[in-house]
Image (cartoon, coloured by chain):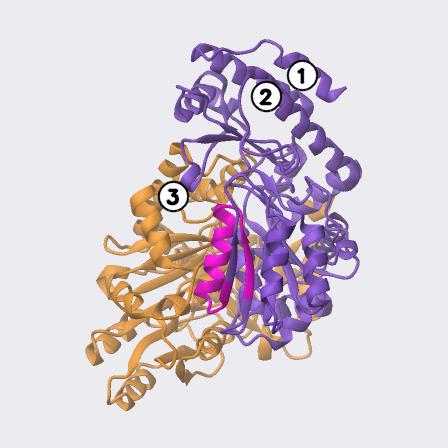
Chain colours: A purple, B orange
Amino acid sequence: MLNQKRFLMIPGPTPVPESVLIELAKHPLPHRSPEFSQILLECTEGLKEIAQTKLAIPLIFAASGTGAMEAVLVNLLTTGDHVLAVNNGVFGKRWADMASLFGAKVERIDCPLGSAVKLEQVKEALDKDKDKKIKLVLLTFSETSTGIANPIKEIAELVHNHNNEIVVAIDAITGLGAMPLKMDEWGLDVIISGSQKGFMIPPGLAFAWVGERAWKLHEKSKFPRFYWDWTKAKNSLLKDKTTPFTPNVSFICALKEALRLMLAEGIENTWARHERLKQSTRKSVKAMGLELLTSDAEASAAITSIKAPDGIEIKDIRQKLKKDWQIVVADGQGELQGKIFRIGHLGFVCERDILTGLSALAEVLHSLNFPLKPNWIKAYREALA
Amino acid sequence: MLNQKRFLMIPGPTPVPESVLIELAKHPLPHRSPEFSQILLECTEGLKEIAQTKLAIPLIFAASGTGAMEAVLVNLLTTGDHVLAVNNGVFGKRWADMASLFGAKVERIDCPLGSAVKLEQVKEALDKDKDKKIKLVLLTFSETSTGIANPIKEIAELVHNHNNEIVVAIDAITGLGAMPLKMDEWGLDVIISGSQKGFMIPPGLAFAWVGERAWKLHEKSKFPRFYWDWTKAKNSLLKDKTTPFTPNVSFICALKEALRLMLAEGIENTWARHERLKQSTRKSVKAMGLELLTSDAEASAAITSIKAPDGIEIKDIRQKLKKDWQIVVADGQGELQGKIFRIGHLGFVCERDILTGLSALAEVLHSLNFPLKPNWIKAYREALA
């Protein structure tokens, strides 16, 4: 029975509000119908607001986030194109690897795990691009595997100052909805995201917001594409108010409700709530005597990575949290497996959830003979004050 | 309120059983967990049974059916490969067009709309392949846009007698679960399907069953692929009991329940039920005085296409069915738009549903001054007897 008490504090899937779950439990609408078109158009408007854009066109795919990453490449690249990719961890590396696989010449900026990219590194890479060959920059907003946030606004500015035609594509799968992102104001050209993070829906939808510079590069791209084709998706949306292929109608109905909830809170309030969740988590965990992987300045508001304390195994922390408290936190990924655990505080998460999670973590640490400092609750109170 | 009485008699999404909807309404599981792995493996076993295979590996993608069609091509083709594609309508044409787009040399067998492919046509095409250049045959099991079923068993036999290395790929998106399909016994090499048809789930999952000949061709294929990569999916499934990228966990939990329902009925009973639904629909509709698009011998058990009666518009029939009876049937697609309407009898459909749908259709026809013949109910009773 208690497995039904399972509480996810991982960076996705994130908790789903009841009213969104109820949408999923409804009989599916026919996807070629005026009712569905109306819902799709409402979602499109909501998605614009979430990414703070009036200019870009949001497209919805039945896929998970990696599908949207692939779509960026096959919609923008021609074999041999030069791409600059920032690699802060598993997902940054994945995108860079994919770009190589799809025939691009990829210049990588590798960052130590747990660090954001430095503007100096980007400048250096752009300085090397004397012949203005770079067509596309791939950049992760919030790197899920480490919990850093990259300074995407500043990087987009640097890139466009170097060459105003370069398309800056942002993997905002984890970060969107958790931290300020202003697509038009910051000159971001493509944003991608997924349903199971800030959007508070199970995994199964991928989103791409495509701006003007990206549409121009897309027109020149010669990569063959069909399922991911942005032109097909745009034409279906704008001309026929639908999708070119059968959409995940149930998830799109759930998206309408999730967007209603997000916009009712107000995007700036959503960002502020995530900032509070991040601050209270980080300060409390530090007060417990634990060490964080990322610096305060570079930390994502979606997820906090905590280093394994001396003499305690990550798997023991995770197992005890799950067995004794029905709380699921994430292990490290790739090189960081067994070295960190990750607490997600993204989406449908309130201050009580963090208090619950931290209390359970404190009990687990205590039971594992970690010299727990008792003032973490004071730090929590202060962080929220 | 009455829009909640909406009853879908379209070829997908099909009606979803309550116990499947309830799975969708649950909080999502973490996808990297033993619980999810267990569910995924159970689904894999169930999928084998549905396609009657012990040898092929079923792979699950977060995508709709067109994604699985694309996956077949990017996993099997190398630019310039020769492909034989049977085109019976919108979906057969789509697959052939995609293969051309992805760089294959595509020989098409075009069939009149509403007709299955003739074995003679296939023989003729194979006879032309003197140098045994054809690597892949694309074939639709049940063409959704017309309602025909192709003789896939006989065609696979012809193809493999011509050249035992050719991969026969079957788009069974609509047909699987509705009509007998025995992957191993019939020597079918790849089957694809989608969640929103015979599987009684909303759209959002795509399936591929990949057999031995297909794995061999896959190894030689040089097309770049990432999201659709069968090797990645196979390795994740067999080694790590998971998916390479975030799966649609909610839909996979729903799939487990849907498979439980299908296997509890028994696949042969499911096929027999669809045959009864097809026969009763076809005989009753003909008894009403309407004309069918397809012959009895070539008709799919998933869907019945009915020609527009003289002087009556398809849109009037569809609108009245929807407005007066809350029943949604499908228009024709492509060239057949406005010329036929299509009644889906696929998935979670019982004899009462067909009686309901036919009664409402009879009322609509009567109200549109069609000279309705009264003996359709007798034909219905006889078809079920």
Q: Which residue is mark 3?
A: B242
Q: Nearer the viewer, residue B190 or A49?
A: A49
Labelled disc at residue A379 = 1
Secondary structure, mark 2, is helix
Q: Position of residue B53 (x, y in %)?
A: 26, 55
- Per the rendered image, the range of residues in magenta is A83-106
Q: Nearer the viewer, residue B88 or A365?
A: A365
* Residue type indicated by callout 2: Lys
| Residue A125 vertical placement versus A266 (above, below) | below
Q: Which residue is mark 2?
A: A286
CA neighbours of label 3 inside 10 A, class few (<14), some (14 to 19), many (20+): many
Q: Position of residue B191 (x, y in %)?
A: 35, 62
Q: Is residue A294 magenta?
A: no
Q: Are marks 1 and 3 on the same chain?
A: no
Residue in view at x 41 percent, y 62 percent: B175
* Among the two numbered marks 2 and 1 on one chain, the one whose residue lies closer to the N terminus: 2
Which quadrant of the structure image shows residue A156?
bottom right
- Badges 3 and 2: C-beta atoms under 8 Å apart? no
Write down the chain letter for disc 1.
A
